[in-house]
Image (tube, grey):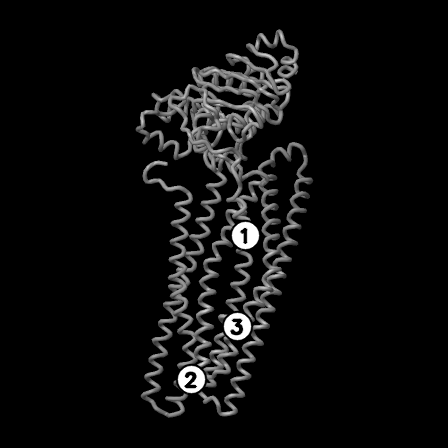
Amino acid sequence: MGAGELSGRDVLTRSVRGQIRRVALGSALGSVHQLGEALVPVLIGVVIDQAVAGQDAGRLALWLGVLAVMYVTLSWSFRLGAKAGERGAEEAAHTLRLAIVSRVLDARGGAEEGRLPGELANVATEDAKRVGAVNMALMAGIWAVAGVVVSAVALLLTSVTLGLIVLLGTPVLLWLGHLLSKPLERRSEAEQDKAAHASGVAADLVAGLRVLKGLGAQQAAVERYRRRSRISLAATLRSARAESWQTGLVLALTGGFIALIALVGGRLALNGTLTLGQLVSAVGLALFLLGPLETFAWVNAELAQGRASAARVAEVLATGPAVVDGDDPVAEPVRGELRLRGVRLDGLDGLDLDLPAGQLTGIAVTDPAGAEALLRCLGRETDPESGSVELDGVPLTRLDPTGLRAAVLVAAHDAALFDGSLAANVIPEDDAEDDEEDDSGRGPADGTADLEPDLRTERAMAAARADEVAHSLPYGAATGVGEGGRSLSGGQRQRVLLARALRAGPPVLVVHDPTTAVDTVTEARIAEGLREFRRGRTTVVVTNSPALLAVTDRVILLDGGRVGAEGTHAELVRTDATYRTAVLA
């Protein structure tokens, strides 16, 4: 970590400290507001006893002035307190969103395991918002406590009986409200789970819309989402019913409590124990108590939902990494030699493999599972069950994952395009700024350090034949490609993805089936462009495409999870029947 940089934990700690300060400020301002609200009926009782009953105009004017000052104080304290509360809630939600996104983007992976992308999005939005709202709920709860305490003290000074009723009855109401919030908490958690799963299914269907249309499976996809949506709706309705029952019962209990205070106060006034002004104050305080007690009901509901969402957020943040964290930096310069020894994982069975630095190596497979496992090992999405993978003689497990990602880029054939222009997908803005501002002397690692950024982009686009895609669009490379590149055909998306990988220029580039959706003529031209662009740098092409394998320096056939044959494409076509079946069949 460089000087001046902060870890995620430091940022989170500072944010929490700031939120605590805002909660304290908002609570203080809100308590001032509640103090004023509680004193208003007391002042009105004083006005009645000292000014109205005594017909003293001077005293009446004085107390009316005091009431005016009180209302001004009430207005400003509420505004400032509510502002602090809302800001605390929004900043807390924002901090959680950043923490969740950081965890999802962690180079060690793991957060996405067993979760659909839509589920993670739901946790980062709705759940983070609900947890952030707990800040406001806590402040409102403190305000309500302050209001109840001030009212109880005022009632004790007015009548010990009324004060004791408030002091003894309020904890009972709070306890009952907490018990009533338990079903809401359980159903709120179920609601968020079902809603997150429905969002995940919807995101999956949208991402695979073209494939579904091609297979004619739109109706089955719609039915699948409809089932998930109905389950989510049922969970939402159950949660809403629980919330309405909880709110209704708490309000009924609160109304009965207020009625009891008014009834006792009225009997005391009839007995002459209370003056007219004191009775008005007591009834006013009883009515004022309705606000804090209703606030307690709302706070209980918010805390119940916040606890359910906090559990979901914590589950994501606590997810362990998919790979162990290495500490060693990647040595500079990166030669790019990869070596696998005794690697076992899914379709790989004790694989020994040498990928020399500076060569274009093709890897053909008889089992797609072996290709997927190899890509996961090289990209360090997961570590092998046994064996080791090395970069320039250093095991990947010892290397810092972030530095490794910069040195070895695994470009999956199904990678995503982002909503933006074609050009922005090939060279993101932050990469462009790095190219312009980098004075470290390293330059880009793609061997085109002497080229201007625009020229490197042009060469990458030309090598992948993505320039032809740009020429076919209304506004060229500035044309938007839509979310996930939906406005492009499958072959066009593949060319843009390959251009992006080439433009990134890592020391080691591993591409997987980059041309499955393009025609044979274009595929042959892309193969030549790839070879020329990556000349002298370590490049691995995992594919069964004859056009791509024909331009490689060497081809390795993986059969049964091990190296089955090795040589040039032409040699293997002539001498190896298994290779011919895998590549030419």
C-alpha distance separating marks 1 and 3: 28 Å
Mark number displayed over residue 45:
2
Q: Where does the image place residue 237, in percent across and percent down from the top left?
A: 63, 57
First in residue order: circle 2 vs circle 3: 2
Q: Where does the image place residue 298, in percent across and percent down from the top left?
A: 53, 64
Q: Secondary structure at mark 1?
A: helix
Quadrant (top left, top right, bottom left, bottom right) of the N terminus: top left
Does residue 115 sit above or below 513 in this rendering? below
Front-lying residue, 327 or 191: 327
First in residue order: circle 2 vs circle 1: 2
Front-lying residue, 127 or 374: 374
Q: Where does the image place residue 388, in percent across and percent down from the top left?
A: 53, 24
Sort mark 3 into few (<14), some (14-19) or many (20+) by Cα contacts within 10 Å: many
Q: Image point 34% across, 91% down: which residue? A: 56
Does residue 237 sit above or below 56 in this rendering? above
Nearer the viewer's eye, disc 1 or disc 3? Answer: 3
C-alpha distance separating marks 2 and 1: 46 Å
First in residue order: circle 1 vs circle 3: 3
Q: Where does the image place residue 307, in percent across and percent down from the top left?
A: 54, 55
Sort mark 2 into few (<14), some (14-19) or many (20+) by Cα contacts within 10 Å: many
Mark number displayed over residue 309:
1
Image quadrant of residue 585? top right
Q: Secondary structure at mark 3?
A: helix
Mark number displayed over residue 170:
3
- Amino acid type shown at disc 2: Gly
Do the residues bearing badges 2 and 3 touch, measured as CB atoms within 8 Å? no
Does residue 148 sit above or below 278 in this rendering? above
Q: Image point 60% across, 68% down: which residue? A: 248
- Amino acid type shown at disc 1: Ser
